Amino acid sequence: MKRGHDHPDDQPDRGHPDHVPPPPAYAPAVAAPRDPVTAVPWGVRVAAEVGWRFVVLAITLYVLMRVIGALELVVLAFVAALLITALLQPVVARLRRAGVPRGLATAITFISGFVVMGLVGWFVVWQVIENTDQLSDQLQNGVGQLKGWLLHSPFHVTETQLNQIARNLQNAIGTNAEEITSAGLQGVTLIIEFFTAAFLAMFSTLFLLYDGRNVWNWVLKLFPREAREGVAGAGPRAWRTLTLYVRGTVVVAFIDAVFIGTGLFFLGVPMAVPLAVLIFLGAFIPLVGAVASGAVAMIVALVTQGPFTMLMVLAVVLAVQQIEGHVLQPFILGRAVRVHPLAVVLSVASGALIAGVGGAVVAVPLVAVTNTTVGYLRSHSAENALRRSAAPPGATASAIAPVLAEPAAEDAAGDSATGAGNDDGGDEPTGR
């Protein structure tokens, strides 16, 4: 028998129950364990990535709002200073171009601006005090006329019911005397806070007018070095948007106040001048402020002159508002600060819920500035990406991306329009 060959008797039967097969000549293929990440669908993974980032942003925004709420007085005072500076800064620039030293130009503009605002406030208070007696008599006559109309109206209101309503009002006032006293004490606190905020706003305005460039340069140092170029370009454009908004709003509000106040005067409505000033101030809250101030004028007209005069005031207010919305704002404000009406309503409502009247005033300019800043930063990022990419032979950036060239040209034109005459850079709060 040759070596290497088994005898047939030595090979066990393959059908025998004790037969064990030899191991295979190759290792069996075993599937590797699947990565748990690949088991999650792509859409779910994207949603999760976006979701946790939104959670982080929401937490950050919540903390920021809590900080702003705790410092509401300081924040509103500084924002008011920014708005006043945007209104007064062109005067400083013109004085500088006329050769007036920077300190003297700042002092003249600052003093004259706040004197004018103080005189307007004093005039309104004086008009209200002068017309208080007349308004009281007219209110009493108006209430008597309203009572007589209700007695003869189809609502079947009886004199007993009217007297009961009057007694209920008196009882409510007597019952809530403690709450009324507490409200009076809160009013004193609000007056103290108002004067504190006014002082902070005046102080901030003075330094923004005088040393705005250094303030802006200090703000730039707070950003990372890689982001400073984009922020430095977005700052002047945001400031230009804010300046255009404040100037345009002042002009539109003045026109509204003049036309509506003239209508109130010829209709014989008492306190036409204070109501016109109220309409001027209300115009700084888009849409909502005009409606509220117009409603006050209508109520005064109804109580003092009757329903017909109220309807005439309503017609005047609506006519002026239509002229404002379709002629004045597009012509004066232009495309630089155009905000969609839905964004205006939502921003005003959000600002009012967060910070009351002050939040409603600063909501729309904040949205306009944010829109300008985000648009420029997006364009700046796209241009940087275009510079880093390899351009085709013989092509230019303008030929590759002509859309990016238009905003750049507009911004350059805007800078030349607003930056003329700033020879030493101290006349502009944003710096350039």
Image (cartoon, rainbow, N blue to C red):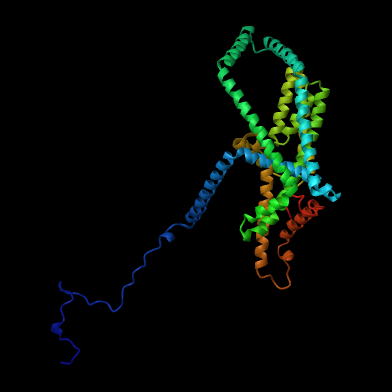
Residue 98, how many percent across, how many down? 86, 49
Q: Is residue 104 visible?
A: yes
Toward the right, the furthest residue is 98
Q: Is residue 430 visible?
A: no
Q: Considering only vertical position in the picture, is 106 above or below 322?
A: below
The C terminus - image quarter: bottom right
**Residue toward you, 118 or 407:** 118
Q: Considering only vertical position in the picture, is 350 above or below 27?
A: above
Toward the top, the furthest residue is 160
Q: Considering only vertical position in the picture, is 320 above or below 396?
A: above
Direction from residue 42 to residue 420 in the image, left or right: right
Toward the bottom, the furthest residue is 2
Residue 313, how many percent across, how many down? 77, 25
Residue 286, how many percent across, how many down? 70, 37
The N terminus - image quarter: bottom left
**Residue toward you, 322 or 238:** 238
**Residue toward you, 425 or 51:** 425
Name which residue lies at 54% across and 49% down. Answer: 57
Q: How many marks?
A: 0
Residue 362, how many percent across, how many down? 67, 40
**Residue toward you, 253 or 196:** 196
Q: Considering only vertical position in the picture, is 402 above or below 283?
A: below
Direction from residue 327 to residue 175 in the image, left or right: left
Name which residue lies at 73% across and 68% down. Answer: 396
Direction from residue 181 to residue 201 in the image, left or right: right
